[in-house]
């Protein structure tokens, strides 16, 4: 199958045509294309382009929203193909986008990749208060707390989560992982979190490494 299929998926993500995106993904899968390449060169390429247009002011919120919906539906279709066959649970994580932040596409991708590594994931959704992460980790026995933030105005909430984990006396029992466009390794060290990863696949690798070492 030609590289054209990825361009078509990308273009239709940008136009928010969820149904067509799903049909194209199925065609690509049937033709033996790998789910990782479909995700990276098709879905994420489309989201990156609409993201750049949003930034320069040539795409607006409604267009970004329909693109996001197409992206989420396409990613859901790919999910079973990205999961490692027959894996049993190696641990439990809770994940969410921090308080004040409604972006969930990256968080959903991280969730999907974690599940693909055999990690049970409790998805707290978006706009999640620091206390909710801590309470969930305690009540549900989560070894990992995974935080996503896309806004410079909300990344500070991650520091609150670290602080509340210390106050609750669970800091040495959980690993706190962070990610999202405005954060980096230096910020991770600054707030005392355990790991920053730049993308969903490396987040899943790091999570697995933590759980196997715990
Ligand atoms: Co918003 N938005 N947005 N937005 N939005 C950004 C983030 C922005 C950079 C666009 C811009 O202006 N340049 C900008 C933030 C600027 C800043 O803070 N510096 C911005 C803004 C300003 C806003 C609003 C304030 C706009 C407004 O209303 N005036 C508003 C805020 C609402 C709120 O949250 N309170 C807003 C709203 C929205 C929409 C609702 C329209 C929509 C979200 C829809 C949804 O999520 N369901 C939206 C979108 C889609 C974007 C952009 C275009 C795309 C984000 C995205 O989904 N990318 C974004 C611009 C951009 O990024 N180019 C933008 C694809 C996704 C796969 O990437 O989430 O980065 P990402 O996830 C990556 C990695 O970061 C990583 O893995 C993923 C890839 O594998 N990752 C982790 C993420 N979490 C991780 C956790 C980990 C590890 C890795 O460990 C736990």
Image (spheres, helix red, strand yellow):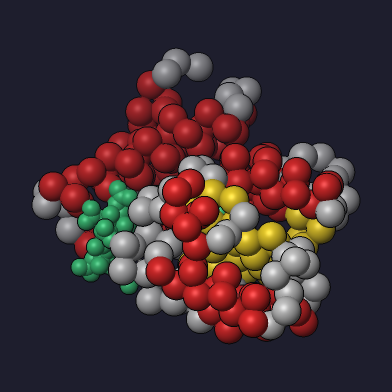
Residue 149 lies, with reference to residue 168, above or below; the image says above
Q: Residue at x 68, y 41 (%)?
A: 205
* Residue 152 locus on image (x, y percent): 31, 62
Left or right, 66 with respect to 202, comes to left
Q: Foreground: 68 or 171? A: 171
Q: Foreground: 190 or 127? A: 190
Q: Residue at x 63, y 61 (%)?
A: 176
* Residue 155 locus on image (x, y percent): 40, 65
* Residue 186 locus on image (x, y percent): 45, 48
Total numbered badges shown on the rendered structure? 0
Quarter holding ligand 1? bottom left
Q: Residue at x 47, y 57 (%)?
A: 190
Left or right, 86 with respect to 22, comes to right
Left or right, 187 with respect to 205, comes to left
- Observer able to see residue 120: yes
Residue found farthest to the left? 57
Quadrant housing the C terminus: bottom right
Q: Residue at x 64, y 75 (%)?
A: 165
- Dividing the picture into quadrants, the one containing residue 94 is bottom right
- Dividing the picture into quadrants, the one containing residue 173 is bottom right
Residue 168 lies, with reference to residue 117, above or below; the image says below
Residue 206 lies, with reference to residue 4, above or below; the image says below
* Residue 82 locus on image (x, y percent): 66, 40
- Observer able to see residue 180: no
């Amino acid at each position: 199958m030609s590289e054209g299929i990825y361009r078509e998926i990308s273009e239709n993500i940008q136009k928010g045509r969820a149904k067509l995106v799903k049909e194209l993904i199925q065609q690509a899968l049937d033709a033996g294309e790998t789910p990782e390449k479909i995700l990276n060169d098709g879905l994420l390429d489309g989201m990156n382009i609409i993201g750049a247009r949003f930034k320069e002011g040539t795409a607006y919120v409604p267009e970004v929203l329909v693109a996001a919906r197409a992206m989420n539906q396409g990613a859901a279709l790919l999910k079973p193909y990205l999961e490692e066959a027959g894996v049993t649970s190696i641990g439990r994580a809770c994940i969410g986008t921090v308080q004040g932040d409604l972006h969930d596409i990256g968080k959903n991708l991280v969730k999907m990749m974690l599940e693909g590594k055999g990690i049970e994931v409790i998805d707290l959704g978006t706009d999640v208060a620091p206390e909710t992460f801590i309470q969930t980790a305690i009540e549900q026995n989560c070894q990992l707390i995974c935080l996503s933030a896309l806004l410079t105005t909300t990344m500070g909430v991650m520091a609150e989560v670290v602080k509340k984990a210390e106050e609750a006396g669970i800091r040495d029992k959980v690993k706190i992982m962070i990610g999202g466009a405005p954060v980096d390794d230096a910020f991770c060290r600054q707030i005392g979190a355990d790991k920053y990863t730049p993308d969903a696949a490396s987040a899943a690798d790091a999570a697995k490494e933590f759980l196997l070492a715990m």
